[in-house]
Amino acid sequence: MSSTFGTVFRTTTFGESHGLAVGAVIDGCPPGLALSEADIQPQLTRRRPGQSALTTPRDEQDRVRILSGVEAGMTLGTPIALEVMNEAQRPGDYRELQSVPRPSHADYTYRMKYGVAARSGGGRASARETIGRVAAGAVAEKMLRDRRGTEIVAFVSAVADVELEGEPPADLSRDRVDATPVRCPDAGTAERMRERIEAAKADGDSVGGIVTCVCRGIQAGWGEPIFDKLTAMLGRAMLSIPATKGIEIGSGFAGTRMRGSEHNDPFVARGGCGLGTATNRSGGIQGGISNGEPIVFRVAFKPTATIGRAQHTVDYEGNEVELAARGRHDPCILPRAVPVVEAMAALVLADLALRQAARG
Protein backbone atom coordinates (compact mmCIF):
# COMPACT_ATOMS: atom_id res chain seq x y z
CA MET A 1 0.00 0.00 0.00
CA SER A 2 1.10 3.58 -0.67
CA SER A 3 0.73 5.13 2.75
CA THR A 4 3.53 7.70 2.47
CA PHE A 5 3.15 11.24 1.09
CA GLY A 6 5.82 13.84 0.33
CA THR A 7 9.41 14.04 -0.90
CA VAL A 8 11.29 16.05 1.76
CA PHE A 9 8.58 16.47 4.40
CA ARG A 10 7.36 12.85 4.35
CA THR A 11 4.31 11.54 6.18
CA THR A 12 3.34 7.89 6.64
CA THR A 13 -0.05 7.15 8.22
CA PHE A 14 -0.94 3.89 9.97
CA GLY A 15 -3.86 2.14 11.64
CA GLU A 16 -7.36 0.85 10.93
CA SER A 17 -10.77 2.23 11.88
CA HIS A 18 -11.39 -0.29 14.69
CA GLY A 19 -7.81 -1.26 15.48
CA LEU A 20 -5.83 -0.34 18.57
CA ALA A 21 -4.61 3.04 17.35
CA VAL A 22 -4.10 5.29 14.34
CA GLY A 23 -1.44 7.90 13.69
CA ALA A 24 1.46 9.08 11.58
CA VAL A 25 5.23 9.16 11.34
CA ILE A 26 6.80 12.34 9.95
CA ASP A 27 10.29 12.23 8.47
CA GLY A 28 12.00 15.41 7.29
CA CYS A 29 10.61 17.98 9.70
CA PRO A 30 13.44 20.49 10.32
CA PRO A 31 15.05 20.61 13.79
CA GLY A 32 14.53 23.49 16.18
CA LEU A 33 10.79 23.91 15.61
CA ALA A 34 8.87 24.56 18.82
CA LEU A 35 6.30 21.76 19.00
CA SER A 36 4.03 20.19 21.59
CA GLU A 37 0.87 18.12 21.65
CA ALA A 38 -1.04 21.35 22.30
CA ASP A 39 -0.02 22.52 18.81
CA ILE A 40 -1.58 19.43 17.23
CA GLN A 41 -4.66 18.75 19.35
CA PRO A 42 -6.88 21.65 18.17
CA GLN A 43 -7.03 20.34 14.60
CA LEU A 44 -7.75 16.80 15.79
CA THR A 45 -10.54 18.15 17.99
CA ARG A 46 -12.03 19.90 14.97
CA ARG A 47 -11.91 16.61 13.04
CA ARG A 48 -13.13 14.28 15.79
CA PRO A 49 -16.56 12.62 15.70
CA GLY A 50 -19.42 13.49 18.01
CA GLN A 51 -19.04 17.27 17.65
CA SER A 52 -22.72 17.95 16.94
CA ALA A 53 -25.96 16.36 15.78
CA LEU A 54 -24.68 16.77 12.21
CA THR A 55 -21.84 14.25 12.67
CA THR A 56 -21.43 10.59 13.61
CA PRO A 57 -22.16 9.94 17.32
CA ARG A 58 -19.02 7.80 17.70
CA ASP A 59 -17.50 9.24 20.90
CA GLU A 60 -13.75 9.57 20.45
CA GLN A 61 -11.62 12.24 22.14
CA ASP A 62 -8.77 11.68 19.67
CA ARG A 63 -6.02 12.69 22.08
CA VAL A 64 -2.62 12.79 20.40
CA ARG A 65 0.68 11.61 21.92
CA ILE A 66 4.09 12.52 20.55
CA LEU A 67 6.20 9.38 20.86
CA SER A 68 9.48 10.54 19.31
CA GLY A 69 11.30 13.30 17.50
CA VAL A 70 10.63 16.04 20.07
CA GLU A 71 12.63 16.84 23.20
CA ALA A 72 12.16 19.74 25.62
CA GLY A 73 9.49 21.14 23.30
CA MET A 74 11.74 21.28 20.20
CA THR A 75 11.92 19.05 17.16
CA LEU A 76 15.17 17.11 16.80
CA GLY A 77 15.11 16.61 13.05
CA THR A 78 14.51 12.88 13.60
CA PRO A 79 11.25 11.03 12.81
CA ILE A 80 8.24 12.33 14.74
CA ALA A 81 5.79 9.57 15.70
CA LEU A 82 2.23 10.63 16.54
CA GLU A 83 -0.32 8.25 18.07
CA VAL A 84 -4.07 8.47 18.71
CA MET A 85 -5.75 5.56 20.47
CA ASN A 86 -9.10 4.18 19.27
CA GLU A 87 -11.27 4.21 22.38
CA ALA A 88 -14.82 3.57 21.11
CA GLN A 89 -14.56 0.60 18.77
CA ARG A 90 -17.79 -1.27 18.06
CA PRO A 91 -16.79 -4.01 15.62
CA GLY A 92 -20.07 -5.81 16.25
CA ASP A 93 -21.85 -3.17 14.18
CA TYR A 94 -20.13 -4.61 11.11
CA ARG A 95 -20.67 -8.34 11.61
CA GLU A 96 -23.21 -8.71 8.81
CA LEU A 97 -21.01 -6.69 6.45
CA GLN A 98 -18.41 -9.46 6.40
CA SER A 99 -20.54 -11.16 3.74
CA VAL A 100 -22.03 -8.07 2.03
CA PRO A 101 -19.98 -5.29 0.40
CA ARG A 102 -21.48 -1.86 1.06
CA PRO A 103 -22.59 -0.05 -2.12
CA SER A 104 -20.05 2.60 -3.28
CA HIS A 105 -17.70 1.77 -0.36
CA ALA A 106 -14.25 0.20 -0.62
CA ASP A 107 -15.20 -3.18 0.89
CA TYR A 108 -15.38 -4.95 -2.47
CA THR A 109 -12.35 -3.33 -4.11
CA TYR A 110 -10.07 -3.90 -1.10
CA ARG A 111 -11.04 -7.56 -1.01
CA MET A 112 -10.46 -7.94 -4.74
CA LYS A 113 -7.03 -6.27 -4.44
CA TYR A 114 -5.70 -8.01 -1.30
CA GLY A 115 -7.86 -11.11 -0.95
CA VAL A 116 -8.75 -9.97 2.56
CA ALA A 117 -10.35 -6.90 4.14
CA ALA A 118 -10.66 -5.43 7.63
CA ARG A 119 -13.37 -7.31 9.50
CA SER A 120 -14.91 -4.16 10.99
CA GLY A 121 -15.41 -0.67 9.64
CA GLY A 122 -13.63 0.43 6.52
CA GLY A 123 -10.15 -0.40 7.79
CA ARG A 124 -7.65 1.82 5.97
CA ALA A 125 -10.45 3.08 3.69
CA SER A 126 -12.28 4.55 6.68
CA ALA A 127 -12.20 8.31 7.20
CA ARG A 128 -10.63 7.51 10.58
CA GLU A 129 -7.34 7.06 8.71
CA THR A 130 -7.35 10.83 8.20
CA ILE A 131 -6.42 11.32 11.87
CA GLY A 132 -2.79 10.67 10.93
CA ARG A 133 -3.02 13.22 8.11
CA VAL A 134 -4.51 15.87 10.38
CA ALA A 135 -1.90 15.31 13.09
CA ALA A 136 0.97 15.50 10.60
CA GLY A 137 -0.68 18.43 8.83
CA ALA A 138 -0.79 20.36 12.11
CA VAL A 139 3.00 19.94 12.40
CA ALA A 140 3.50 21.05 8.78
CA GLU A 141 1.24 24.02 9.35
CA LYS A 142 3.15 25.01 12.50
CA MET A 143 6.37 25.04 10.48
CA LEU A 144 4.79 27.06 7.66
CA ARG A 145 3.19 29.56 10.03
CA ASP A 146 6.26 30.07 12.23
CA ARG A 147 8.87 30.16 9.46
CA ARG A 148 6.95 31.38 6.38
CA GLY A 149 3.94 33.29 7.77
CA THR A 150 1.55 30.98 5.91
CA GLU A 151 -2.16 30.81 6.85
CA ILE A 152 -4.48 28.02 5.69
CA VAL A 153 -8.27 28.26 6.17
CA ALA A 154 -10.89 25.94 4.66
CA PHE A 155 -14.67 26.11 4.93
CA VAL A 156 -17.81 24.38 3.69
CA SER A 157 -19.01 26.27 0.63
CA ALA A 158 -21.73 23.88 -0.56
CA VAL A 159 -23.96 21.14 0.86
CA ALA A 160 -26.17 19.38 -1.68
CA ASP A 161 -27.88 22.22 -3.63
CA VAL A 162 -27.12 24.96 -1.07
CA GLU A 163 -24.04 26.96 -2.06
CA LEU A 164 -22.26 30.01 -0.67
CA GLU A 165 -22.05 32.42 -3.60
CA GLY A 166 -19.20 34.80 -4.38
CA GLU A 167 -15.55 34.98 -3.42
CA PRO A 168 -14.23 33.80 -0.01
CA PRO A 169 -14.70 36.53 2.64
CA ALA A 170 -11.74 38.90 2.96
CA ASP A 171 -11.80 38.45 6.75
CA LEU A 172 -11.96 34.65 6.54
CA SER A 173 -10.63 32.96 9.69
CA ARG A 174 -11.02 29.63 11.45
CA ASP A 175 -12.91 31.32 14.27
CA ARG A 176 -15.45 32.61 11.77
CA VAL A 177 -15.66 29.21 10.07
CA ASP A 178 -16.16 27.39 13.39
CA ALA A 179 -18.92 29.78 14.49
CA THR A 180 -21.47 27.38 12.93
CA PRO A 181 -21.53 23.56 13.26
CA VAL A 182 -21.63 23.25 9.47
CA ARG A 183 -18.36 25.25 9.22
CA CYS A 184 -19.72 27.72 6.69
CA PRO A 185 -18.67 31.34 7.40
CA ASP A 186 -22.09 32.77 6.41
CA ALA A 187 -24.75 32.20 9.07
CA GLY A 188 -27.75 32.28 6.70
CA THR A 189 -26.21 29.82 4.25
CA ALA A 190 -25.03 27.63 7.13
CA GLU A 191 -28.61 27.36 8.43
CA ARG A 192 -29.90 26.19 5.05
CA MET A 193 -27.04 23.67 4.88
CA ARG A 194 -27.95 22.38 8.34
CA GLU A 195 -31.53 21.82 7.19
CA ARG A 196 -30.35 19.74 4.22
CA ILE A 197 -28.12 17.59 6.45
CA GLU A 198 -30.81 17.02 9.07
CA ALA A 199 -33.37 16.10 6.41
CA ALA A 200 -31.01 13.49 4.97
CA LYS A 201 -30.24 12.15 8.44
CA ALA A 202 -33.94 11.79 9.22
CA ASP A 203 -34.30 9.67 6.07
CA GLY A 204 -31.32 7.46 6.98
CA ASP A 205 -29.52 9.02 4.04
CA SER A 206 -26.55 11.31 3.36
CA VAL A 207 -25.52 14.36 1.32
CA GLY A 208 -22.27 15.64 -0.17
CA GLY A 209 -20.88 19.05 -1.01
CA ILE A 210 -17.79 21.22 -1.48
CA VAL A 211 -14.97 22.45 0.77
CA THR A 212 -13.14 25.61 -0.32
CA CYS A 213 -9.59 26.26 0.90
CA VAL A 214 -7.65 29.54 0.93
CA CYS A 215 -3.88 29.57 1.58
CA ARG A 216 -2.30 32.98 2.22
CA GLY A 217 1.31 34.03 2.81
CA ILE A 218 2.70 31.82 0.04
CA GLN A 219 5.94 32.93 -1.55
CA ALA A 220 6.28 32.92 -5.32
CA GLY A 221 8.30 30.00 -6.64
CA TRP A 222 6.87 26.95 -4.85
CA GLY A 223 6.21 23.99 -7.13
CA GLU A 224 8.39 21.63 -9.16
CA PRO A 225 7.76 21.35 -12.90
CA ILE A 226 6.94 19.17 -14.69
CA PHE A 227 5.23 16.33 -12.82
CA ASP A 228 5.39 17.80 -9.30
CA LYS A 229 3.60 21.01 -10.15
CA LEU A 230 1.84 22.62 -7.21
CA THR A 231 -1.45 22.01 -9.00
CA ALA A 232 -0.59 18.34 -9.50
CA MET A 233 0.49 17.87 -5.88
CA LEU A 234 -2.67 19.53 -4.57
CA GLY A 235 -4.72 17.32 -6.87
CA ARG A 236 -2.99 14.17 -5.65
CA ALA A 237 -3.33 15.23 -2.01
CA MET A 238 -6.99 16.17 -2.14
CA LEU A 239 -8.10 13.22 -4.24
CA SER A 240 -6.44 10.89 -1.71
CA ILE A 241 -8.94 12.02 0.95
CA PRO A 242 -11.82 9.54 1.35
CA ALA A 243 -15.05 10.46 -0.50
CA THR A 244 -13.47 13.10 -2.76
CA LYS A 245 -14.64 13.29 -6.36
CA GLY A 246 -12.82 16.28 -7.81
CA ILE A 247 -10.80 19.47 -7.30
CA GLU A 248 -11.00 22.90 -8.93
CA ILE A 249 -8.15 25.41 -8.64
CA GLY A 250 -8.84 29.11 -9.13
CA SER A 251 -11.57 29.60 -11.74
CA GLY A 252 -11.78 25.82 -12.22
CA PHE A 253 -14.30 24.53 -14.73
CA ALA A 254 -16.05 27.91 -14.84
CA GLY A 255 -12.93 29.30 -16.50
CA THR A 256 -13.56 27.11 -19.55
CA ARG A 257 -16.58 29.26 -20.37
CA MET A 258 -14.52 32.48 -20.50
CA ARG A 259 -12.34 34.01 -23.18
CA GLY A 260 -8.65 34.52 -22.53
CA SER A 261 -9.17 38.28 -22.37
CA GLU A 262 -11.63 37.74 -19.52
CA HIS A 263 -9.72 35.01 -17.76
CA ASN A 264 -6.14 36.36 -17.74
CA ASP A 265 -4.79 37.88 -14.50
CA PRO A 266 -2.99 41.16 -15.39
CA PHE A 267 0.16 41.87 -13.38
CA VAL A 268 0.41 44.87 -11.08
CA ALA A 269 3.33 46.36 -9.14
CA ARG A 270 3.47 45.60 -5.41
CA GLY A 271 5.91 48.33 -4.45
CA GLY A 272 9.10 46.76 -3.18
CA CYS A 273 7.48 43.32 -3.03
CA GLY A 274 7.72 42.43 -6.70
CA LEU A 275 4.66 41.79 -8.85
CA GLY A 276 1.14 40.71 -8.03
CA THR A 277 -2.01 40.18 -10.06
CA ALA A 278 -5.11 42.37 -10.30
CA THR A 279 -7.38 39.31 -10.28
CA ASN A 280 -6.79 35.74 -9.11
CA ARG A 281 -8.50 33.43 -11.56
CA SER A 282 -5.27 31.41 -11.58
CA GLY A 283 -5.88 30.57 -7.92
CA GLY A 284 -2.37 31.67 -6.96
CA ILE A 285 -0.64 29.20 -9.29
CA GLN A 286 0.77 29.73 -12.79
CA GLY A 287 2.67 27.08 -14.73
CA GLY A 288 2.36 24.83 -11.69
CA ILE A 289 4.32 27.32 -9.53
CA SER A 290 2.99 29.67 -6.84
CA ASN A 291 2.87 33.32 -7.95
CA GLY A 292 2.56 34.89 -4.48
CA GLU A 293 -1.22 35.42 -4.58
CA PRO A 294 -3.56 33.43 -2.28
CA ILE A 295 -3.96 29.82 -3.38
CA VAL A 296 -7.67 29.06 -3.73
CA PHE A 297 -9.16 25.66 -4.54
CA ARG A 298 -12.38 23.69 -4.07
CA VAL A 299 -12.74 20.00 -3.25
CA ALA A 300 -15.90 18.02 -4.05
CA PHE A 301 -17.09 15.31 -1.63
CA LYS A 302 -19.68 12.70 -2.51
CA PRO A 303 -22.49 11.73 -0.09
CA THR A 304 -21.27 9.36 2.65
CA ALA A 305 -21.42 5.84 1.21
CA THR A 306 -22.50 4.03 4.39
CA ILE A 307 -26.13 4.87 5.16
CA GLY A 308 -28.84 3.50 7.41
CA ARG A 309 -31.45 3.38 4.66
CA ALA A 310 -32.14 -0.09 3.26
CA GLN A 311 -30.51 -0.70 -0.12
CA HIS A 312 -31.13 -3.55 -2.56
CA THR A 313 -27.76 -5.13 -3.38
CA VAL A 314 -26.02 -8.54 -3.43
CA ASP A 315 -23.60 -10.34 -1.11
CA TYR A 316 -20.16 -11.64 -2.15
CA GLU A 317 -21.81 -14.84 -3.45
CA GLY A 318 -24.15 -12.86 -5.71
CA ASN A 319 -27.27 -13.48 -3.61
CA GLU A 320 -29.75 -10.60 -3.47
CA VAL A 321 -30.05 -8.92 -0.05
CA GLU A 322 -31.44 -5.81 1.62
CA LEU A 323 -28.68 -3.94 3.44
CA ALA A 324 -29.11 -1.24 6.07
CA ALA A 325 -25.88 -0.39 7.90
CA ARG A 326 -26.02 -0.30 11.72
CA GLY A 327 -22.76 1.56 12.35
CA ARG A 328 -22.28 5.19 13.42
CA HIS A 329 -21.85 7.33 10.34
CA ASP A 330 -21.90 10.97 9.24
CA PRO A 331 -24.97 12.10 7.29
CA CYS A 332 -22.58 14.65 5.76
CA ILE A 333 -18.80 14.42 6.00
CA LEU A 334 -18.20 18.06 5.03
CA PRO A 335 -17.92 19.74 8.49
CA ARG A 336 -15.29 17.22 9.63
CA ALA A 337 -13.53 17.26 6.25
CA VAL A 338 -12.50 20.92 6.69
CA PRO A 339 -9.42 20.23 8.89
CA VAL A 340 -8.49 17.27 6.65
CA VAL A 341 -8.37 19.53 3.60
CA GLU A 342 -6.30 22.05 5.57
CA ALA A 343 -3.93 19.29 6.68
CA MET A 344 -3.32 17.97 3.19
CA ALA A 345 -2.75 21.50 1.89
CA ALA A 346 -0.20 22.04 4.67
CA LEU A 347 1.62 18.80 3.82
CA VAL A 348 1.88 19.82 0.15
CA LEU A 349 3.05 23.36 0.91
CA ALA A 350 5.55 22.27 3.59
CA ASP A 351 7.11 19.76 1.23
CA LEU A 352 7.38 22.21 -1.67
CA ALA A 353 8.65 25.02 0.58
CA LEU A 354 11.49 22.80 1.80
CA ARG A 355 12.26 21.68 -1.74
CA GLN A 356 12.46 25.32 -2.84
CA ALA A 357 14.68 26.22 0.14
CA ALA A 358 17.04 23.39 -0.83
CA ARG A 359 17.79 25.25 -4.06
CA GLY A 360 19.69 27.79 -1.96
Image (cartoon, rainbow, N blue to C red):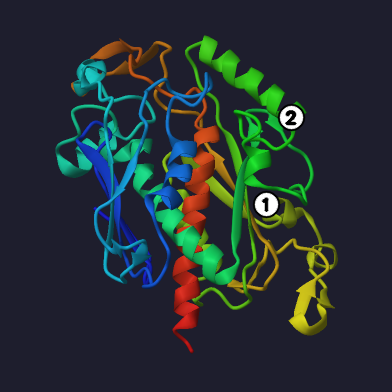
Q: Residue at x 38, y 50 (%)?
A: 37
Is 111 located above or below residue 239 in the figure?
above
Q: Nearer the viewer, residue 188 or 46?
A: 46
Mark nearer the N terminus (2 vs 1): 2
Is 349 located above or below residue 201 in the figure?
below
Q: Residue at x 62, y 44 (%)?
A: 174
Q: Is residue 309 left or right of residue 72?
A: right
Secondary element at image label 2: helix
As drawn, the label of residue 253 is 1
| Identity, as a three-letter code, of the amino acid under mark 1 | Phe
Residue 255 at x, y = what percent?
A: 73, 56
Secondary element at image label 1: helix
Q: Nearer the viewer, residue 333 or 133?
A: 133
Q: Is residue 113 left or right of residue 211?
A: left
As drawn, the label of residue 79 is none
Q: Residue furthest front?
A: 72
- What distance separates the C-alpha of mark 2 from that of mark 1? 27 Å
Per the image, the residue denoted by label 2 is 187
Q: Residue at x 79, y 68 (%)?
A: 264
Q: Quadrant of residue 311?
A: top left
Residue 280 at x, y = what percent?
A: 75, 63
Residue 325 at x, y = what percent?
A: 34, 16
Q: Quick one: label 2, few (<14), some, or many (20+) residues within 10 Å?
A: some
